């Protein structure tokens, strides 16, 4: 390898470059070819001016900042909308008159408040299941959720039966375990969507878990007769 090639591979000391340009200002100002490569030019006042390339870089940076700002604003609006819809949904659920009315409100909430296909309350036996609720056999919830899992997000084919005659439209789902009454009976609050991206395995379950707690407390107002 030649000495020149070895010299090119050595890192350049920025301070040495600055010192050279301070001592030899004409080197850069008089080299129009180099100025052009750098996107610079000398204006009539003998001042180096940032040319089109530099302006383009500044415009690109401004555009990137604007895109990021719009994304942040869109996220903030979406979060505010989701919060408002959640508050309204809680009020809807608390206004339920009985178990069947609660199940109807869960389904309406899913569709009208969150643009989902359906919402379902399921209860595991033995024992009576309220009208409008989906009945599960004893032990079925552990089979669907896993023995210790509280929530499951994303598509899970074994849980399609929860959605009754709408199962053919379900492409993703959110399932949250519930415990109701004393002695405790196991239940599930289930939401289904036709959008495969509505619920994904990496998505947090905090919102649906919160709604499940509201359903639990509301359902416990009335005994199962």
Image (cartoon, helix red, strand yellow):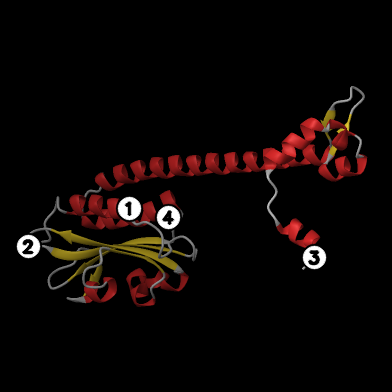
- Other residues around mark 2 within 10 Å, as few (<14) / some (14–19) / many (≥20): few
Gap between marks 1 and 3 measured at Cα: 65 Å
- Which residue corresponds to mark 2? 183
Q: CA distance from mark 4 to mark 3?
A: 74 Å
SS at mark 1?
Answer: helix
Q: Number of marks in the image?
A: 4
Residue 48 is left or right of residue 206, and the answer is right
Q: CA distance from mark 4 to mark 1?
A: 19 Å
Q: Which residue is mark 4?
A: 111
Q: Quadrant of the N terminus?
A: bottom right
Q: Nearer the viewer, residue 56 or 100?
A: 56
Distance from label 1 to label 2 (Cα)? 26 Å
> Residue visible at 25% across and 45% down?
94
Please state the horizontal and vertical placement of residue 67, each as a whole percent of the image. 63, 43
Between label 2 and label 3, give the one nearer the viewer. 3
Q: CA distance from mark 2 to mark 3?
A: 86 Å
Q: Earlier in the sequence, mark 1 or mark 3?
A: 3
Dot 1 alpha-carbon crowd within 10 angstroms: few under 14, some 14 to 19, many 20 or more: few
| Mark 1 lies on residue | 206
Residue bearing the label numbered 3: 2
């Amino acid at each position: 390898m030649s000495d020149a090639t070895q010299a090119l591979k050595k890192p350049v000391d920025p301070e040495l470059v600055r010192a050279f340009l301070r001592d030899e200002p004409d080197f850069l100002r008089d080299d129009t070819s180099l100025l052009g490569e750098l996107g610079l030019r000398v204006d009539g006042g003998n001042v180096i001016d940032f040319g089109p390339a530099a302006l383009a870089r500044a415009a690109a940076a401004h555009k990137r900042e604007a895109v990021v700002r719009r994304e942040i604003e869109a996220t903030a609006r979406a979060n505010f909308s989701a919060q408002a819809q959640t508050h309204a949904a809680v009020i809807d659920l608390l206004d339920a008159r009985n178990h069947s009315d609660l199940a109807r409100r869960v389904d309406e909430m899913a569709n009208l408040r969150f643009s989902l296909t359906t919402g379902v309350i399921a209860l595991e036996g033995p024992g009576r299941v309220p009208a409008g609720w989906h009945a599960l056999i004893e032990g079925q919830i552990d089979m669907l959720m896993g023995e210790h899992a509280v929530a499951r997000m994303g598509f899970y084919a074994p849980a399609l039966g929860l959605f009754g005659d709408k199962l053919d439209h379900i492409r993703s789902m959110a399932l949250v375990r519930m415990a109701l009454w004393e002695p405790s009976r196991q239940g599930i609050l289930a939401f289904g969507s036709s959008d495969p991206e509505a619920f994904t395995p990496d998505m947090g379950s905090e919102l649906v878990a919160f709604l499940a707690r509201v359903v639990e407390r509301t359902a416990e107002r009335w005994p199962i007769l």
